[in-house]
Image (cartoon, rainbow, N blue to C red):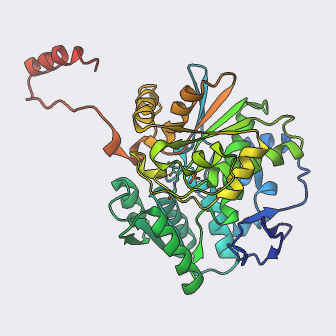
Amino acid sequence: MSESLVCIRCSRELAPSAIQCDCGGLLEIRRPPLTVPRSRFDERRASRRTIDQSGVWRFREGVLSASEAQIITHPEGSTRLYERGGIWFKHEGENPTGSFKDRGMTVAITQAVRIGARAVACASTGNTSASLAAYAAQAGLRAVVFVPLGKVAAGKLAQTLAYGALCLQIRGDFDAAMRLVREASSRLGLYLVNSINPFRIEGQKTIVWELLQDLAWEPPDWIVVPAGNLGNTSAFGKALVEAREAGWIDRLPRIAAIQAHGANPFYRGFREHFARRHRIEAETVASAIRIGDPVSWERAAAAIRATDGVVEEVTDAELMAAKRDIDRMGIGCEPASAATLAGVRKLNLTGRVVCVLTGNLLKDTDAIPGEVVEIDPDIDAVERALRETRAGGQ
Ligand code: F0G
């Protein structure tokens, strides 16, 4: 294959099945500079072939050099870009399993099949597990997911079970589940497809490439993303640098990575110019990003540096106020995704701003305020309900 797997710490090249280097460093996929013109992607967007309809595999030269027969695609991606009140929202909740994870998962599962893996595994706050379970089902692979007990939204767990994954609920938090799955994958031969897996990053880059394409390749000033385990932040930086190298864009947008105040190790690191790595015990209403020890730290720090990016934190109250506004725009998203708009407000960002909404509204219905009015089946009751709720603005 034309890609190579390289350790970002010691520069060693590793086998295609490797997840991490012996030195502890994260892996990155490198390939010769991309020569494909961006017009090719515009042609493919109009094509009816499944591989071109996928918003991931449309960019295949920059994703993975798999043969078409090897590719496990739903298809995914090709999500909409909405403009509301002068801000753009790229809605990754429109992916097949309702979150951006499908973009990385189609690549990781394709790679799992290519290296002959029998079983795939991840730790998850719910979205990765749902995506993994769906793609493993499609590929006919055994799926094992490690989730923190009592900390995953019910719908995400239901998806994971429906697609047939073995669900291990860990008596501990996400970070404990992550440590355990890493150990299990090296000892028990499970192929790990968390975003520590560099093939996941290759797929997630296409969020950025597709949004650049949506904007007719005129780069925005800011791309705003919620930050948890830091896979997306890493992928966005890599995507932007590669897009500029390929001549698809002539300047880099800046990345703004937004964390919840109670799960803010990366924000703490940013404030100290990433002088050291922070690990905390995480707590936030946004369960998807309740992560205290993110695995992709080094790659994400490189992404922030490369794009002159920033990291901000928002409180749960700020994040939920932003969620209410995104919901009331008729778009909707899960709480973690709303960290983006809360971050735009906190940072007072101006210019052309794209918020990446990472998960669907229905992913986490516990977090939706508002009340349903119960009435008898008669018209007077309807009239009363309309009168009484008008004051509440419903
Ligand atoms: N938004 C949503 C909806 C997520 O599910 C996640 C991560 C993030 C943002 C953060 O992205 O980890 O790349 O920084 N969810 C993972 C999971 C951890 O298991 O589903 P990140």
Q: Evaluate whether residue 44 shows in this view.
A: no
Residue 231, position in %: x, y?
63, 55
The answer to which quarter of the image holds residue 373 is top left
The answer to which quarter of the image holds residue 146 is bottom left
Quadrant (top left, top right, bottom left, bottom right) of the N terminus: bottom right
For the point 41% across and 47% down, which residue is it? 284
On screen, residue 270 versus residue 238, left or right, reads left
Residue 285, position in %: x, y?
38, 45
Residue 278 or residue 49, whichever sits in front: 278
Residue 292 or residue 252, whichever sits in front: 292
For the point 70% across and 34% down, which residue is it? 214
* Vertical placement of residue 94 versus 10, above or below: above
The answer to which quarter of the image holds residue 330 is top left
Residue 236, position in %: x, y?
70, 47
Quadrant (top left, top right, bottom left, bottom right) of the C terminus: top left
Residue 265 or residue 151, whichever sits in front: 265
Residue 223, position in %: x, y?
67, 36
Q: Evaluate whether residue 127 shows in this view.
A: yes
On screen, residue 76 versus residue 151, left or right, reads right
